Image (tube, rainbow, N blue to C red):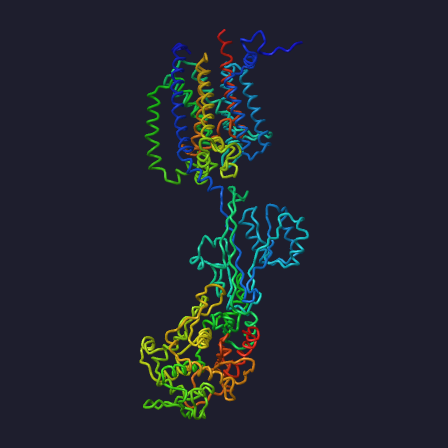
Amino acid sequence: MKYISPLESPHHNTPLLQQWLQQMHMDFPLLAGLMILAITSLFVLYSASGQDIAEIQKQGLRMGFGFFIMLFLAQLTPQMLQRWTPVLFVIGLILLGLVLVVGVQVKGAQRWLDLYFFRFQPSELLKLVTPMALAWFLADNALPPRPLKLMSSLLLLSLPVVLVAAEPDLGTSLLIASAGFFVLFLAGLRWRFMLGASFLLAAFAWPIWQYVLRDYQKARVLTFLNPENDALGAGYHIIQSKIAIGSGGVYGKGWLNGTQSQLDFLPERHTDFIFSVYSEEFGLIGAILLILLYLFLIFRGLYIASQAQDSFSRLLGGSISLTFFVYVFVNIGMVSGLLPVVGVPLPLISYGGTSIVTLLAGFGMLMSIHTHRKMLST
Amino acid sequence: MRRVQLKDHIAESRLFTNRAIFSGFFILVLVLLVVARLVFLQVSSHEHFTTLSNDNRVKLLPIAPTRGLIYDRNGIILAENLPAYRLEITPEQVKDMEKLLLQLGTLIKIREHNLKQFKKQLKHKHKFDNIPLRFRLNDTEVAKVAAILHRLPGVQIVASLDRHYPLGKTFSHVIGYISRKDIKDLKNLDATNYIATNHIGKSGIERYYETELHGTVGYQQVEVNAQGRILRTLQKTPPTAGNDIHLSIDAPMQAIAEQALGEFNGSIVALDPRNGQILTMVSNPGFDPNLFINGIGYKDYKRLRESKSRPLYNRALQGRYPPGSTIKPFIGLAGLKYGITNEHYELFCPGYFIIPFGEERKFRDWKKTGHGTVDLDKSITESCDVYFYDLALNLSIDRIQPFLASFGFGQKTGVDMPIDNSGLLPSREWKRRKKKQPWFPGETLNTAIGQGFLLITPLQLATGTAILANRGKRIRPHLVLGKDRQVATPTEDPLLAKVQERHWNYIFKAMQHVIETPHGTARRIATKKYSIAGKTGTAQVFGIKQDEKYDATKIAFKLHDHALFIAFAPVKNPRIAIAVIAENGGGGGSVAAPMAARLLKHYMARNPK
């Protein structure tokens, strides 16, 4: 049998690769962007880990697992996802409750469930299941939601938020809250309601912060946001991080040549502060290219959501995309000294398995929304 | 349940799109904010952060220079740098520290305090830092450890240079010593140049020529990581070693002088009157300067501090002694110069002197029976006090004081040493200022026989003798050769230049008679090989009452008279001038003069011209 190259094939107006991707329910632009990110991540990690190839292999395996989860979720139709949402949500809440009772304590916070063969963080699951649950709840009725519906959704949202905050993990709790808020916002939450809410928040929060809380309490609140770093430690981190980014300049010091990271001055350099390593070695040009890549993924996500044909898919897809942006913004803002230090990894670049699996699962759902669209319309 | 409102799919889709577009704009605004921040960090503040980044990673490590050596005039080494070995351990390379320490304990002696110090540092230092366990390993210990060093990972033998004074005690007061620098020293030092230096000259030549001996610090620019581990050397500026110093001292003669003084406390100073080079400068007793280098032990220091003979006290420069009769040639010369006396004037010495029209106080001669009829020559040869009482009375302190000052008495000698005591040359004005009293004629009499207020240091006495030998040409005593031609050239003194040649000759002749005539007080050191001009002195340590007689057997040794002797040789064109002071030595002629003779014998044999 003669081999026929894709270009010579009779179907060359619908390329073979695209056909194959459609069959696999993959969205090519998203997949390409994620792959580039993953490869970039491995290169930066190689530098940040002090050229430890074993660590790179481990991270590669985790990524492989993440991509597998993405592939799996993309096969499910949005309708299946919607159907299973209430079950998943209830399971998630039960697991959160379990964490509080029998969870493993690490650094003063109870976030992990020990499943004997691996440790599992239920709050990660809720990062995805919470917007799903809200989208499911709101999609039932006409949008924008009526006040009663809105109140019920807020109550629904408050369940995981409060449970995660009780671990305590205020950072993740706020991220879950924002994922939920994005669903509400995309569902058409009234501007006047948002204005009123933010006015109320500001009206109370500022005087309380300024006059009621004492310095040590403020410090405690800040530490509460990120228990791994006390105020002093965080200060050192930020100084070294700014030195790393700033000394990188426009063109960077070159791959494997960042002195701040290679000589151990930069703490947490393969996890939360990996952007500093990246910017030191690849400079402003590299940083802007990376941000553009992120923007591409986010806008692609928003586009997919807007093209979706049902409210659940729209709201879920939009929330996933916006939450992804929040991760990027908070991490880069934090390492460059714009925002306080809160433990948020740089999506898909930082070392570690949990966040990669969660994020890629989100992209799997986006792909599912996009690739099952046409079938629905027929 | 009933549906209150039907879903309007198109409207909901439009609503979502609007919200999504709004979010997109909001995202763009935030991204621009982040990019602006990055531009600020990486473009506007780039230089600032580059500096900080380099400050982080580049450290300057100073390298101490090697200290200059000190030699005597013959090239004999007096201060050297000997290699010293210490054993260091790098903890991160050691698997089982306890086992290693036990193993090392079988090879070398490890004392309790070594272990204690080591374990203390082990806790506080980095795992990659070298921690010293033992200092100053001897050759056997070095050999034992070196033989199995390859089986002891983490163990190193490190060589460094330690100061050593091979002639120890003999040169303790001249060379001085170096010791660990302390906070007090830091104030006076160039902190940058001394940053890697642990030792600094504390006394003697080591202190006076500190800058010269020290050298210039070198630097090594190294890259370090956040823990301070040195990764590589970027740049190296080697240190410049300190200059070597050659002393004018003759080491064998110095040793002879030390031996000559023997058990006596005291000092011998000899110098070359032609140029002021100090040939010998001994202060007895000395001490072992090697004890001080790495911090003297409490016991040793207490022993030195509390010793009655005060070994840390530099008698040659700090000791203030009455010159006794050794001052007489100078007073005699003044008498001749001012015409108070002449070569022919004689007087009768009954053994005492009474100031005419003065108080009924008897000024006694050391010889109770008196010297009979004496002229100036005989007064110097036999050391008659009465003649000088008479002479002093007519000279007056107002002429004696400036005349003695011309010989350097009462003034700093200008020697290149950290200490330079000016002694005490009294004057009418000094008495009024210090004692709030007028000058009494009796005090002039005491001054003329080298007692009373007049105090000299041994170096001053030797310098005065050298100026006398030079016929009034002043010299500046110094210890280091080749420093400055100006220093080594004798200079005219305006007052002494007016002294007639025959007056110098007369005094020299009289001083020669001290040695060469049967009545001379130093007749026992006479030699045919060369001519010597000298003068003995016996200085009272405590006052004897009017009708008492000094009896050495009856009084405690420490109250015995000091024995003094000055000399120069040969009389024509002198090449050496000596001053000897033996504390509580008794007689100048019997004790001090033979000491000088030993030095003269050595020097004249070695330096025939």
Q: Is residue B393 left or right of residue B104?
A: left
- Image quarter (top left, top right, bottom left or bottom right) of the N terminus of chain B: top left
B38 vs A182: above or below: below
Q: In this view of the protein, can residue B609 be seen by the observer?
A: yes
- Image quarter (top left, top right, bottom left or bottom right) of the C terminus of chain B: bottom right
Q: Is residue A190 left or right of residue A298?
A: left
Quadrant location of residue B419? bottom left
Quadrant location of residue B398? bottom left
B370 vs A144: above or below: below
* Residue B461: image location, x then y, percent: 45, 76
Residue nearest the viewer, comparing B409 with A170: B409
B314 vs A76: above or below: below
Q: In this view of the protein, can residue B320 be seen by the observer?
A: no
* Residue B411: image location, x then y, percent: 40, 72
* Residue B10: image location, x then y, percent: 40, 10
Residue nearest the viewer, comparing A26 with A212: A26
Residue nearest the viewer, comparing A3 with B317: B317
Q: How many marks?
A: 0
Quadrant location of residue B36? top left
Residue nearest the viewer, comparing B578 with B606: B606
* Residue B290: image location, x then y, percent: 55, 64
